[in-house]
Image (cartoon, rainbow, N blue to C red):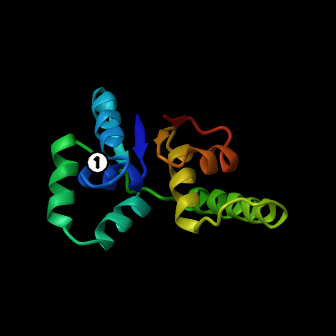
């Protein structure tokens, strides 16, 4: 079971995106898996134009919303966000937003792997999380 990050879905939907072919190929490769999105990914997808297209795309691939975000998800996200911020102040790590840590924490809590085009940040913040590719 795999949770998808926003960047994979948006790239797959946009033929002009530099990672479009990679996203389409990855989704094809993962099609035999049970695929989910987390509430933060859902919210990010709803924030843009064209929700009807995005919703139809998700439905067509059988991608489901895993909506449960109990308190331990929020606690872990906050802890890992804080640790990342401490490391970032001492190094040149890129700035990340809390939603990224909610996505990682949600996947970890539910025992899901995470498919993303930003594996470095997730591997650093959640070393116990399986990140693909």
The quadrant the N terminus occupies is: top left
Q: Position of residue 34 (x, y in %)?
A: 32, 34
Residue farthest toward the right in the current orientation of the protein? 90
Placement of 37 over or under 82, stated as above or below = above
Q: Residue at x 18, y 48 (%)?
A: 59
In this rendering, position of residue 34 left or right of residue 87: left
Question: Where does label 1 land, which residue?
Answer: 12
Query: Which of the two residues, 78 or 93, is positioned nearer the viewer here?
Result: 93
In this rendering, position of residue 115 left or right of residue 48: right
Q: Position of residue 131 (x, y in %)?
A: 54, 38
Q: Residue at x 43, y 56 (%)?
A: 68
SS class, disc 1: helix
Q: Residue at x 31, y 46 (%)?
A: 20
Placement of 59 over or under 127, stated as above or below = below
Q: Position of residue 107 (x, y in %)?
A: 50, 46
Placement of 95 over or under 9, stated as above or below = below
The answer to whether residue 80 shows anywhere in this view is yes
Residue 127 position by quadrant: top right
Placement of 27 over or under 45, stated as above or below = above
In this rendering, position of residue 115 left or right of residue 104: left
Q: Residue at x 15, y 44 (%)?
A: 60
Q: Position of residue 106 (x, y in %)?
A: 51, 52
């Amino acid at each position: 079971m795999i949770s998808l990050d926003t960047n994979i879905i948006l790239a797959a939907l946009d033929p002009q995106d530099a990672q479009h072919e990679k996203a389409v190929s990855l989704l094809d490769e993962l099609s035999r898996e049970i695929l989910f999105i987390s509430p933060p990914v859902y919210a990010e997808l709803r924030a843009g134009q064209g929700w009807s297209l995005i919703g139809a795309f998700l439905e067509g691939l059988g991608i489901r919303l895993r909506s449960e975000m109990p308190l331990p998800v929020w606690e872990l996200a906050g802890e890992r966000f804080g640790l990342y911020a401490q490391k970032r102040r001492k190094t040149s790590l890129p700035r990340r937003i809390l939603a990224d840590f909610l996505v990682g924490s949600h996947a970890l809590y539910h025992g899901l792997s995470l498919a993303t085009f930003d594996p470095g940040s997730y591997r650093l913040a959640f070393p116990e999380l399986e990140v693909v590719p």
